[in-house]
Image: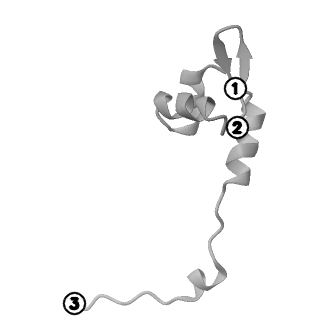
Amino acid sequence: MTVREASQYLAVPVATLYTRVWKRTIPFVRLGRSVRFDRKVLDQLIESNTVQPTEHYFDVELPRESC
């Protein structure tokens, strides 16, 4: 997928992807002067950077609003 497609898929600006390519912090494929991304690799990137909520988060009782 192209940089523009990947930016839409990841919901980040195109400039962010180019910066990450330049810094080599995101896997990419270079075809001549073009940069491409593999959807499966992006899915793995999303999965590996997903933050799970802590267990105690669900045990906390939210304060009730008084009327």
SS category of the residue bearing label 1 = loop
- Mark 3 lies on a secondary structure that is loop
> Mark 3 is on which residue type?
Cys
Kindly identify which residue carries mark 3: 67
Circle 2 residue? 42
Q: Nearer the viewer, mark 3 or mark 2?
A: 2
The earlier-in-sequence mark between 1 and 2 is: 1
Tag 2: residue type? Leu
Q: From mark 1 to mark 2, how far is it between C-alphas?
A: 7 Å
**Direction from residue 54 to residue 43 in the image, left or right:** right
> Residue at label 1?
37
Identify the amino acid type marked 1. Answer: Phe
Residue at (72%, 41%) from the top-left corner? Answer: 43
Which colouring convention does the figure follow? one colour
Residue 37 % position (x, y):
69, 26
Query: Which is more N-terminal, label 2 or label 3?
Result: 2
User: From the viewer's perspective, is the residue at label 1 or at label 3 nearer?
Assistant: 1
To which quarter of the image does residue 33 belong?
top right
- Secondary structure, mark 2, is helix
Q: Is residue 42 left or right of residue 22?
A: right
Q: Is residue 17 left or right of residue 52?
A: left
Image height check: is 29 above or below 41?
A: above
Q: Earlier in the sequence, mark 1 or mark 3?
A: 1
- Distance from disc 3 to disc 2, alpha carbons, whole Å, reads 47 Å
Quadrant in which the C terminus appears: bottom left
Task: Please state which of residues 15 and 49 is positioned toward the viewer in this rendering.
Answer: 15
CB under 8 Å between callouts 1 and 2?
Answer: yes
